[in-house]
């Protein structure tokens, strides 16, 4: 590739559905004043080892992946990216529950309650 050619933008580790993007917008509309975005991480917890966690973020971390959405900035924890590459994040609501749902090709199994996964 020559110096004058441009490279395509790298593909995000996680693809957000329109419903997930709308949920990020809804969260940011009522976020604490110091929040700069919403962040996905995979802390160690549950019977399978890792869980999905979505929280407000107040400062950008050096290795976090940053995704601009129509409703606000969505971050992926830098230490979690390898567990999430190729995933899709959706927001699903029905009569009884509402929450983010993940389709993660890296997950090799999950606990019975669906709270955690393993890679």
Image (cartoon, rainbow, N blue to C red):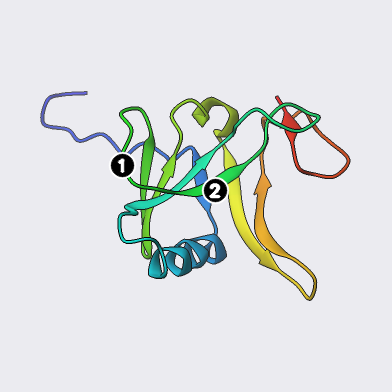
Residue 24 x/y as whole percent: 47, 61
Label 2, secondary structure: give it: strand
Label 1, secondary structure: give it: loop
Label 1: how many Cα within 10 Å (few below 14, some 14–19, many 20+): few
Q: Which labelled disc corresponds to residue 59? A: 1
In the rendered image of this protein, does residue 119 appear above or below residue 12? above
Looking at the image, residue 100 sits to the left or right of residue 71; the answer is: right
Residue 41 x/y as whole percent: 53, 37
Q: Residue furthest right?
A: 112
Image quarter (top left, top right, bottom left or bottom right) of the N terminus: top left
Image quarter (top left, top right, bottom left or bottom right) of the C terminus: top right
Residue 32 x/y as whole percent: 38, 60
In the rendered image of this protein, does residue 32 appear above or below residue 7? below
Q: Residue at the spot x=40%, y=63% of the render?
A: 31
Q: Residue furthest left?
A: 4
Q: Which callout, 1 or 2, points at the residue further toward the start of the chain?
A: 2
Residue annotated with mark 2: 54
Q: Are marks 1 and 2 in contact (CB under 8 Å)?
A: no
Residue nearest the viewer, comparing 108 with 27: 27
Residue 62 x/y as whole percent: 30, 28
Q: CA distance from mark 1 to mark 2?
A: 15 Å
Q: Residue at the spot x=57%, y=37% of the render?
A: 86
Label 2: how many Cα within 10 Å (few below 14, some 14–19, many 20+): some
Looking at the image, residue 111 sits to the left or right of residue 7; the answer is: right
């Amino acid at each position: 590739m020559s110096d004058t050619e441009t490279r395509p933008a790298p593909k995000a580790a996680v693809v957000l559905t329109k419903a997930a993007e709308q949920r990020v917008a809804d969260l940011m509309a009522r976020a604490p004043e110091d929040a700069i975005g919403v962040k996905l991480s995979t802390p160690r917890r549950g019977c399978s080892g890792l869980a999905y966690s979505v929280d407000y973020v107040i400062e950008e971390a050096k290795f976090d992946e940053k995704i601009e959405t129509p409703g606000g900035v969505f971050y992926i924890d830098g230490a979690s990216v390898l567990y999430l590459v190729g995933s899709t994040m959706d927001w699903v609501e029905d009569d009884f529950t509402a929450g983010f749902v993940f389709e993660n090709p890296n997950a090799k199994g999950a606990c019975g309650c669906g709270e955690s996964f393993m890679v």
